[in-house]
Amino acid sequence: MLEDEAIIAFALEDMLVADGANVIMAASLEEAEALIHEGGIGSAVLDVNVHGEKSYGIGAKLQSLDIPFVFATGYGDTSHPPEFAKTPTVSKPYTHEQIKSAMARARLGPASALLG
């Protein structure tokens, strides 16, 4: 999971752990990049805006590795670059059910497999 707001990260971690996920948290793009390099990621939830930078580069790396992911954003219906048009997106604040549904859609979508 890539999330720079600690309260949101811990709440999301609780949701994902409740679903049986082994969660690895990253609070910066650099941390997320290192975790991807280490491998072992099955799927991911990416905050769109991390410390003022967009996480699209991380999304592109996950896409290239066929790892499914979901975007999370506090900006409502954010318009993503065309290569992410079909990536499921949840708006903050989101519910456990919204995360579960988006992750299920991501696994069935074009990128077939958190930061965790």
Image (cartoon, rainbow, N blue to C red):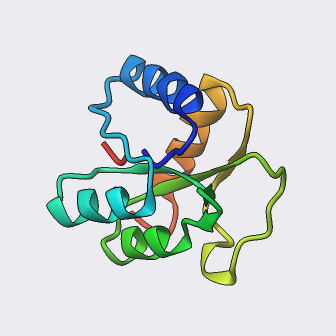
* Residue at the spot 68% in from the left edge and 72% down from the top edge: 85
Q: Which image quadrant is residue 113 in? A: bottom left
Report the number of discs: 0
Give the farthest residue toward the bottom.
82
38 sits to left or right of 77: left
Q: Image quadrant for the C terminus?
A: top left
Q: Image quadrant for the N terminus?
A: top left
Residue 94 place in picture, x, y as percent? 70, 31
Residue 6 place in picture, x, y as percent? 52, 31
* Residue at the spot 60% in from the left edge and 67% down from the top edge: 53
Residue 37 place in picture, x, y as percent? 20, 66
Give the farthest residue toward the right.
76
5 sits to left or right of 78: left
Q: Check the image and report above or below for 100 versus 79.
A: above
Residue 73 place in picture, x, y as percent? 70, 50
51 sits to left or right of 57: right
Q: Which image quadrant is residue 20 in? A: top left
Question: Quick one: 2 or 112, which is closer to the camera?
Answer: 2
Q: Which image quadrant is residue 58 in? A: bottom left
Q: Check the image and report above or below for 41 versus 12.
A: below
Q: Check the image and report above or below for 72 versus 92.
A: below
Q: Check the image and report above or below for 2 versus 37.
A: above
Question: Quick one: 94 or 33, which is closer to the camera?
Answer: 33
* Residue at the spot 42% in from the left edge and 50% down from the top edge: 44
Question: Quick one: 52 or 3, which is closer to the camera?
Answer: 52
* Residue at the spot 54% in from the left edge and 65% down from the top edge: 55
